[in-house]
Amino acid sequence: MRKFKKIMPLLVLTAMIMGQSLIANAQTSTATATDIQLFVDGKNITDLSEPLIINDRIFVPLKVVSEALGATVTWNGEHRTVSVVKDNKSVFLWIDNRLVKYDNGETYLLSDVPPVIINNKTYVPLKLISNGLRIGITWDGNTRSVILDSSQSSSIESIYDLEITSHQDGAIIHGKTEVAFDIPEQLKARVAEIKLLVLDPETGKGPIVASTKDFQETLTYLPKMEDKGARILALALYDSDRQFIGGDTLRIQINIIPQVKIIGLSSIPYKDDIVIDQEVNFVAHHIQYELKELSSGKTTVFTDQDPEGTLTWQPTFEQNGLYEIKVIAYDSDDKGYESDISTVTFDVDRALYMGGVSSKRTIKAAVNLIASRNFNVTHTEYWLKDVETGLSSLIAQVPYGAYTWTPEPNDVSEKEFYVKVTDVRGVVHTSAPVSVMIDSRPYVSLVGIGPNQVLTDAVELSVKSNVTLDSVRYILKNETTGAINNLSKALSPDISYTYTPSASDGTSLSLYVEANYNGQVLTSEAIQVKTYLGTLYSAKPIIEKDQFLSFASNLAVASYHQTGMSAALQTAQAILETGWGQSVPVDKYSGQFSYNLFGIKGTGTNGSVISNTWEVYNGVTFRVDANFRAYHNVNESWNDHKKILLELSRYEPYRAVMYDSTLGAWAIRRAGYATDPAYPIKLMNIIEQYHLESLDDISI
């Protein structure tokens, strides 16, 4: 196993470079001049090198010191990298990145602080030069001098006394693997978060592949098929202030041998539901289940399934028999990898029950009766039994399917529904009865509007009744003044009425209908509504559509560095929720812009805006007003959305994998974020189409 000696700096240098303070960039660092002298091979180059103390570390300009040692320094401005080569030794650095590559990639280590650019010069800790060129470094306390001596040799030394213990340098990763590591006692108390990253040796960046805030010394790494080839496995520890406090690296080779397994099946014949579970050794985009009935050859397919979920299926009685089950796991390129075939037997009993009505329900109008069964039939009969008399009557005969039954007027009694069916062998089966209360006294309902609806334009009104009405009249009441207005004369119940609100009607109204039936007057429930005849405002763009990707991804990347939530997934959600930023809620009455990028209801930092949502009343879908959170700016909206995901208990499964866009997309759906079953697929398709996965590549 690769093992490097931990650096043991000289006493005085340790005092000057004490602590584990870190720098993210030159702008957030405090650089101060120092009286320390710097000698290279006996020559004082202090005036040329201008040593600085940055966050308690001695930094020197890399080019000046390296060239004084006879090394060649090469700068790449496009990629912000610098290499130092002397003889057969080399060190390669990325600006603002703790990863250091030695000897053309034979060794990778983590520095406690990254190189920075100050006044157009690349400054690095002295130890990086000593490590890279393997030269001696000493301290002269009398002259306060740091002495670099190329005649003295040294070895590459790791700064941190911790290491990945489960794998050796150059290990090959074939699939899901447990990564174990040893953390020294002096660090354990400071660790608040542990991350595992897989870095590209060319860019020094890569995604987080595992993370935990619970102290442990093992993390599970589930690789992606697209990550094949040479990589750097990096362990990174952070304290409660999100400051890096230690890490380790290994060279690895990712060469996944795909394994898809079906787990949890029984050899005992299934009499009820079967739950199919699976295990995949790589990050699957989605799962497909296939069940093939051997005698008929018919295959039942379930596509676009959750890789972390299970499939529950129950065949009908006629589907009993021996089945072959196969699971196919797909990667992000939609390439499928099949499991071995498992066989199961279904021996489901016939089942029949009366559907469409529930026990003890009071029925006042027509109901849709359903013969719920799991076998084929040639004949279906719906029956009704009067509990008081004990007499049963046949109410419908159909080959199969549902039947809509309407009670007789003024029928108030306890009844029992049941259904008889004849199967394909000619055997009759009878369901258990369902007891209900019939209360079919004549009634009339107003159809076309719903409670609390805001009417802004004409609406078409009609009626529904359990009797044949003679005529109807539509009536309006001003809830403020109490004034009654007959909107129509007596109309045929088959004729709808169009109501167009006017200013004279008022703004707080109720609408109802009076109907004539056999000399009786039936009055419907009054439905309270409001009217608004002023200017209406609709959703607006937050930015031009072609600029939204850059706009959202910048916010997402900043959030990713702060929270660890996948920037790719955050960006895809913003795109999907706002239609590329073109549909952001505004107050429909005032035009106030909400800055609400995720359609969150309620009250935000800037109150609420009123927009539309949908409800159903009397079988009709209609719009009602709803409050959506409003913010002062887009940052407040973005942060509020993240707060919901980070703090609500139901999103705990999401938080466990929030660093990964694929795992996170499925977890957020599983936690109930969206009702659309295709929500994860839609997010992942956006991520793949626009190559958003690169947003999750970070450096240490």
Image (spheres, rainbow, N blue to C red):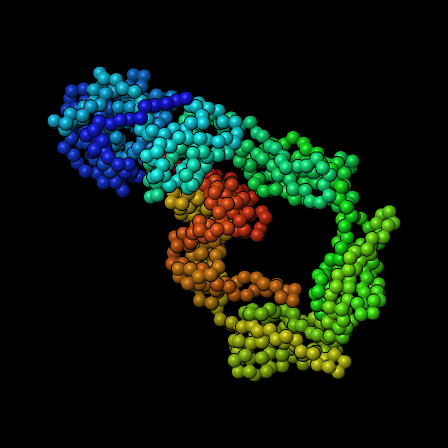
Query: Can you say which quadrant of the picture contains the C terminus?
Result: top left
The residue closer to the viewer here, 214 or 235, is 214
Q: As drawn, is 13 to the left or to the right of 480? A: left
* Nearer the observer, 316 or 10: 10
- Give the left or right position of residue 204, taking residue 410 as reference: left
Task: Choose between 696 and 17: the one closer to the eye.
Answer: 17
Q: How many marks?
A: 0
Q: Quadrant of residue 170?
A: top left
Q: Residue at x 76, y 80 (%)?
A: 518
Q: From what the image shows, is residue 71 above or below residue 110?
A: above
Q: Residue at x 53, y 42 (%)?
A: 684
Q: Give the farthest residue toward the front.
A: 185
Identify which residue is drawn at 16% across, 20% down: 42
Closer-to-camera residue (440/204): 440
- Residue sitting farthest toward the right: 426
Residue 346 sits in quarter: top right
Residue 599 in the image: state x and y as whole percent.
Answer: 49, 56
x and y, in percent, of residue 317 in the image: 77, 45
Residue at 32%, 34% (x, y): give it: 186
Expressed as whole percent of the image width and height from the top left, the position of residue 35 reads 14, 32
Instruction: For the N terminus, give its image quadrant.
Output: top left
Q: Is residue 85 visible?
A: no
The answer to whether 28 appears left or right of 557 in the picture is: left
Asked whether the viewer can see residue 229, the reply is yes
Instruction: Pinpoint residue 524: horizontal percent, then vertical percent.
Output: 66, 75
Q: Is residue 229 above or below residue 310?
A: above
